[in-house]
């Protein structure tokens, strides 16, 4: 591998485009991949396709040549030995699959597409292959890649990888979050039982993603833990290959691909609600997920992400109105307000007088029958001392 990498030392010529590298893959899928049927991201495309959002894929590189990714991949950077390739060479195929899941185009004549086809991918290469490694230099390379992504306008960072936890890496994650960049990471694939979280998914503020299968069950190799936030498809995955126009299939899947689906949903949210902080984006993802019966568990966190609900749902409270809620109505002066008050008083006084007349009329009629007249006393009425009437 070292000898192969050493052959790429010629500086790029003007107009240079990355040659195809990596596995060529197989024939295109004939039916819509099950994750797209499960998540139905197209329901959210009526509101946004993720336009204007850059997603950094820190991985094994991303091919810019596959039809699904043509025009979607920006010039990036390589931190692992291929600086002249600008992150656009993917010898492993892993990063290209991840990028296709996030931002794959919809106009290629295949039933495959990305979750957020309007986004752009910033490719950053840190992995020469997909083998597990305890290389102590890797966390430092990932930390540099995170800072590079933030400084180059990424709004979402996808980390479909595991590495050793270091202070340098933790500081880089904090740098991203402080700069309002959403960080999504794979919860990890367990080769054996372990109680510790995977990193960088285990860092506070990072959205940790577990995997589910076609039946909606937790993928057995997906690490469980209280740090898991949400879940997404992570089994029997098909996505573009880097070496041409073919496709790669991963029957065992992994949380790497589940994280990519969540990064795509995060990009959709970012496009519609650019004012949200990373914590608010994470809250929107978790509060709108298809939750398990108990609300949350260590296998899938708050549940499976729901692209449409994550983008469209109004969230908030009376003191903190939901995004998209109608503003408080502005009072409009009533030009007839004075006349309206006078009319109300006139109606009230008129009604009162009518009641008085209705009540007094039978009293007056009764008095007249008994000989009452204004200003005179009845002749047969007793005087003031109780005596009878005076003689005429």
Image: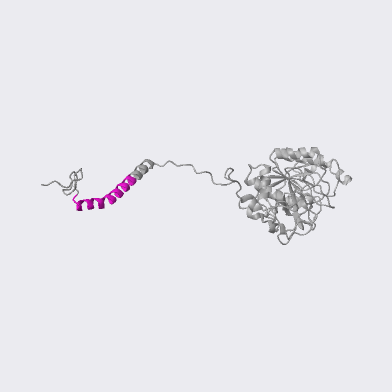
Is residue 134 toward the left or the right of residue 340 in the image?
right
**Residue found farthest to the right:** 3
Q: Position of residue 375 (x, y in %)?
A: 18, 43
Q: Residue at x 66, y 41 (%)?
A: 277
**Residue pictured at 79% horizontal, 40% vertical:** 169
Give the farthest residue toward the left. Answer: 392
Residue 80 on image: x %, y %: 82, 42
Closest to the observer, 71 or 145:
145
Q: Main secondary structure of the magenta part?
A: helix
Is 194 placed above or below 28 here? above
- Colouring chosen for the image of the structure: one colour
Residue 359: within the magenta? Answer: yes
Which residue is at a point 67% across and 45% down the rendered structure image? 281
**Percent position (x, y) of residue 275?**
63, 41
Residue nearer the viewer, 116 or 259: 259
Disc count in the image? Answer: 0
Residue 390 visible within the image: yes
Which region is colored magenta?
Answer: 346-371
Asked whether residue 51 appears in the rendered view, the answer is no
Q: Is residue 329 left or right of residue 273?
A: left
Residue 391 part of the magenta-drawn span: no
Question: Residue reaching furthest bottom?
Answer: 30
- Towards the viewer: 328 or 107: 328
Indicate the position of residue 179 as horizontal and vertical percent values.
70, 38
Between residues 224 and 214, which one lies in front from this camera angle?
224
């Amino acid at each position: 591998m070292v000898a192969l990498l050493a052959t790429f030392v010629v500086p790029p010529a003007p107009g240079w485009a990355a040659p195809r590298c990596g596995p060529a893959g197989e024939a295109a899928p004939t039916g819509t991949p099950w994750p797209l049927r499960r998540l139905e991201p197209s329901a959210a495309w009526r509101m946004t396709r993720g336009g204007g959002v850059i997603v950094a894929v820190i991985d094994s590189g991303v091919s810019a040549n596959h039809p699904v990714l043509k025009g979607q991949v920006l010039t990036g950077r390589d931190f692992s030995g291929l600086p002249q390739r600008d992150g656009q060479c993917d010898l492993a195929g892993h990063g290209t699959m991840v990028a296709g899941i996030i931002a794959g185009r919809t106009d290629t004549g295949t039933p495959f597409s990305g979750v957020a086809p309007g986004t752009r991918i910033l490719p950053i290469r840190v992995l020469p292959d997909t083998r597990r490694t305890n290389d102590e230099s890797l966390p430092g390379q990932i930390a540099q890649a995170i800072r590079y992504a933030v400084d180059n306008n990424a709004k979402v960072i996808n980390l479909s990888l595991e590495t050793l936890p270091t202070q340098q890496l933790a500081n880089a994650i904090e740098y991203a979050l402080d700069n309002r960049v959403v960080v999504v990471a794979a919860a990890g694939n367990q080769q054996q039982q372990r109680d510790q979280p995977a990193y960088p998914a285990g860092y506070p503020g990072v959205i940790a993603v577990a995997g589910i299968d076609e039946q909606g069950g937790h993928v057995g190799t997906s690490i469980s833990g209280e740090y898991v936030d949400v879940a997404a498809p992570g089994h029997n995955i098909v996505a573009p290959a880097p070496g041409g126009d073919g496709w790669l299939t991963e029957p065992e899947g992994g949380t790497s691909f589940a994280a990519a689906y969540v990064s795509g949903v995060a990009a959709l949210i970012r496009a519609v609600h650019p004012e949200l902080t990373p914590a608010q984006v994470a809250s929107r993802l978790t509060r709108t997920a298809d939750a398990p019966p108990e609300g949350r568990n260590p296998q899938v966190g708050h549940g499976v992400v729901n692209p449409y609900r994550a983008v469209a749902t109004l969230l908030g409270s009376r003191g903190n109105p939901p995004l998209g809620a109608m503003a408080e109505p502005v009072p409009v002066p009533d030009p007839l307000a004075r006349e309206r008050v006078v009319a109300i008083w006139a109606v009230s006084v008129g009604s009162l007088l009518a009641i008085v007349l209705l009540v007094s009329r039978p009293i007056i009629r009764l008095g007249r029958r008994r000989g009452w007249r204004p200003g005179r006393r009845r002749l047969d009425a007793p005087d003031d001392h109780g005596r009878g009437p005076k003689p005429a």
